[in-house]
Amino acid sequence: MQRCIDLAKNGRGSTSPNPLVGALVVHDNTIIGEGWHKKAGTAHAEVVAINSVKNKALLSESTLYVSLEPCSHFGKTPPCADLIVSEKLAKVVVGCKDPNPLVAGNGIKKLLDANIEVEYGVLEQECIDLNNIFFVNQRKNRPFITLKWAQSNDGFMDINRAHNEQGSFAISGIKSKVFVHKLRAHRGAILIGSNTARTDNPTLSTRWYGGESPVRLILNKADNLPKTLRVFNDNKETVVFVSEDKLQSNSKFKVALSEQEFLLQMLRYCIKINISSILVEGGKQVLQSFLEHNLWDEIFVIQSDIFLNEGLKAPLPQGELLGDLIAGTDVIKHYQNNAILTV
């Protein structure tokens, strides 16, 4: 099962909104086939693993290991459970059940009804953690939300600024920047507020890591951002969320929302258009809003070794500290929401 998990990770950044899944076929304690889900709309891990077996006569004497319950419904591809039944595998070992209501135990039931031996719950929490984004999508009906900010050693995220002063102040180092751009490549969208859009004028790309840049989301209730900002270039889609009572003009990249439950409406819109995960890189006001509404799943705090002594105080991180990552002279602290999904 650990091998299934390792295989599944090869699909990071390309399977959304589908989960990461790895599978392998074992005959007489020897792996004879393996595979992982590579991209949404392509063959699932079980299909890839079974098709990779050269001697199909061995399948009826083999065990299929898979990190997530085989699907039992028609989507962009046929049900994996049907293929397993038709190939007459002797046993299937499942890491964890699929939270998708269209599956949710039905895949396992279909295998059992076909007299295939099934074992599930092997490395269950590890398999859930592998797909924390997918589980949050299915159980909470919203994208998985990652908050990120950089702060000085003494807890400031920016210098004191004059009114309308523009330009970003670098707190973290190059290695941390590479880490953040890698994180961007593994998220469906990146979100900032209007103040960050104006002051920093960022491009919000993955230029320090490679991989596909995420969709750019901007919270701009007043609908007053200049179109000359770099987030409005043609490199990637940009969506601006504005208050419906402040909408200046209609545009293909604007989404008007009511003031009531503004964040929740924005998140529901995102999950509707298959944005399964969001990296929030906004300023303090935006970050604090997500924290106060408990709309977050993990936090990365990049702590620099520099001292500012004064400036804009960073938010206080919440949740459980999972560990530290050393990035040059910076320390990246990883926190998890205490209410995140568990077995």
Image (spheres, rainbow, N blue to C red):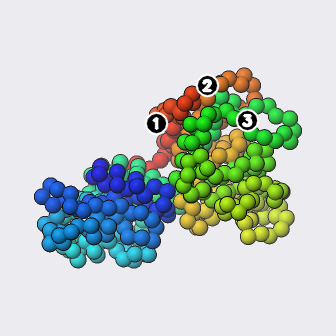
Query: Which residue is disc 3 drawn over?
Result: 169
Residue 208, x across and y down, in percent: 59, 46
The answer to which quarter of the image holds residue 89 is bottom left
| Image position of 153 with respect to 100: above or below | above
Q: Earlier in the sequence, mark 2 or mark 3?
A: 3
Q: Amino acid at mark 1?
A: Leu
Q: Amino acid at mark 2?
A: Asp
**Which circle marks residue 180 in the picture?**
none
Query: Which residue is disc 1 drawn over?
Result: 322
Q: What residue do we see at 34% from left, 58% from top?
A: 22
Q: Is residue 226 left or right of residue 284?
A: right
Residue 289, x across and y down, in percent: 67, 46
The residue nearer to you, when weighing 208 against 273, is 208
Is residue 106 in sight in this rendering? Answer: no
Circle 1 residues within 10 Å: few <14, some 14–19, many ≥20: few
Q: Secondary structure at mark 1?
A: strand
Q: Residue furthest right?
A: 163
Q: Amino acid at mark 3?
A: Phe
Q: Find the distance from the CA under tag 2 to the CA under tag 1.
A: 21 Å
Q: Earlier in the sequence, mark 2 or mark 1?
A: 2
Q: Earlier in the sequence, mark 3 or mark 1?
A: 3
**Which circle marks residue 305 in the picture?**
2
